[in-house]
Amino acid sequence: MKEKKVEEKKAAGEKTVETLTCPVQKKCGGCQFLGMPYAQQLNIKQHQVEKLLRPFGRVCPIIGMENPYYYRNKVHAVFGRTRTGEIICGTYQENTHKIIPVEQCLIEDRKSEEIIRSIRGLLKSFKIKTYDEDTGYGLLRHVLVRRGFQSGQIMVVLVLADPIFPSKNNFVSALRRLHPEITTIILNINAKKTSMVLGEREKTLYGPGYIEDTLLGKTFRISAKSFYQVNPVQTEVLYQTAIGYAALTGKERVLDAYCGIGTIGLLAASQAKEVIGVELNADAIRDARINARRNSITNVKFYNADAGKFMTGLAEQNINVDVVFMDPPRAGSDEAFLSSVVKLQPGKVVYISCNPETLARDLKYLTGNGYKVEKIQPTDMFCFTEHVECVVLMSKVEK
Ligand code: SAH
């Protein structure tokens, strides 16, 4: 943050990055860097990335946020009761299943938190029991709220242990009266003893069953079970970096692997000849296909498959691919995918990663098999936490 702004904030009596505190920081374990000046947080992340990735190439200075607070567009609250029967909602204590109440979090969207507090208030009057993980008794397990920062659309997902939700219509009406800004309410059923938040089955109680949001001028539909980046401000920075690295000319066949709702491929499509997207989650692929139509993009095709298996198929058929965008989950990619990249020899690979450790492992594979790292760009998507996102440009070494 710029010195002047800090001074202005101090003068106005507003708390700054340096002084803000959270009463549950230690128990929650989410914000490892809270209480540390933002510049120092960025320094730590820069060093962490350099330590792991410097052997592969030069690391550019990390791109931080202008305002690193309340950036999360998705808020999850687990519901339960204290021994005395009081309803609480918040987060699990680190590495346990004990619920710690969270009133206000410094990185989560405040409107979403307000809605969660309203739901807690409604439970009593509607006599809705919270779920007890030990006994398996009770109904409401979790609430998930997602807000489109640009569209203003809000999705509320009520995760219940049982599909039978007595007085659901009245509950939905009451919630909408309190928050007319909610655009859709979804019932998700999770009857399993599991640490996964969402179950398979869902039913829309109000609205279209999804929200839309805009990134870099294109509009994307997001379903409850689809992945969507949690920091939309930095997502635009991340995607611009990734697409810029690809330096497309309009002639390329581009693969968007681990594509989610199709965001990267759809944003790159106007600069490519064609885009192929692949993603494991069926709901996300449905969103991606609709997103193509929604934005009148006709040179894309989305496939619902495991990225490794799909890529192996492309390699077996010797399908020419010029550029690969790959954005796998924290666990990174796999040998099936990486060995197929090596076989297909795309000129460029742009790797987007939220885990520098698995990224280093996968870079080791690719740089050992005919690729070299051109650029590495860390981006702060998860301010106040130890997590860091990176975009890496690799190119094929000419023989
Ligand atoms: N590129 C997207 C999604 C990135 S998150 C975006 O920026 O929004 C990683 C995605 O990989 C998730 O959507 C997840 O469902 C998907 N995924 C996880 N394992 C996969 C696999 N084996 N094959 C294909 N997709 C997978």
Image (tube, rainbow, N blue to C red):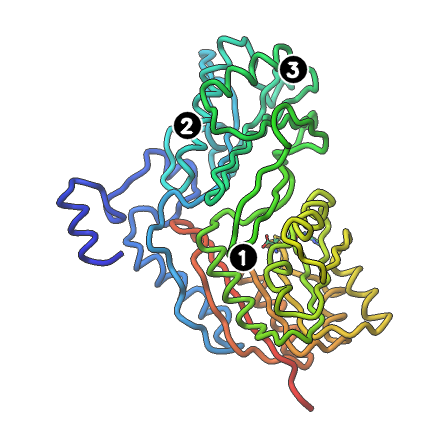
Amino acid type indicated by mark 2: Glu
Q: Earlier in the sequence, mark 2 or mark 3?
A: 2
For the residues bearing labels 2 and 3, Cβ distance under 8 angstroms: no
Say which residue label 3 marks.
165
Q: Secondary structure at mark 1?
A: loop
- Quadrant (top left/top right/bottom left/bottom right) for the C terminus: bottom right
Amino acid type indicated by mark 3: Phe
Percent position of residue 345, x then y? 73, 78
Q: Earlier in the sequence, mark 1 or mark 2?
A: 2
Say which residue label 2 marks.
114
Q: Nearer the viewer, residue 370 or 180?
A: 180
Mark 1 burial class by Cα count in 10 Å: few <14, some 14-19, many 20+: many
Residue at image x 50%, y 59%? Answer: 389
Quadrant of the rendered structure where residue 300 is? bottom right
Q: CA distance from mark 1 to mark 2?
A: 29 Å
Q: Is residue 336 left or right of residue 49?
A: right
Q: Is mark 1 within 8 Å of ligand 1?
A: yes
Q: Secondary structure at mark 3?
A: loop
For the residues bearing labels 1 and 3, Cβ distance under 8 angstroms: no
Percent position of residue 187, x then y? 64, 25
Say which residue label 1 marks.
354
Residue at image x 61%, y 28%? Answer: 207
Q: Is residue 304 left or right of residue 63?
A: right
Percent position of residue 146, x then y? 52, 37
Amino acid type indicated by mark 1: Cys
* Camera-side mark, 1 or 3: 3
Q: Earlier in the sequence, mark 1 or mark 3?
A: 3
Percent position of residue 126, x then y? 53, 9
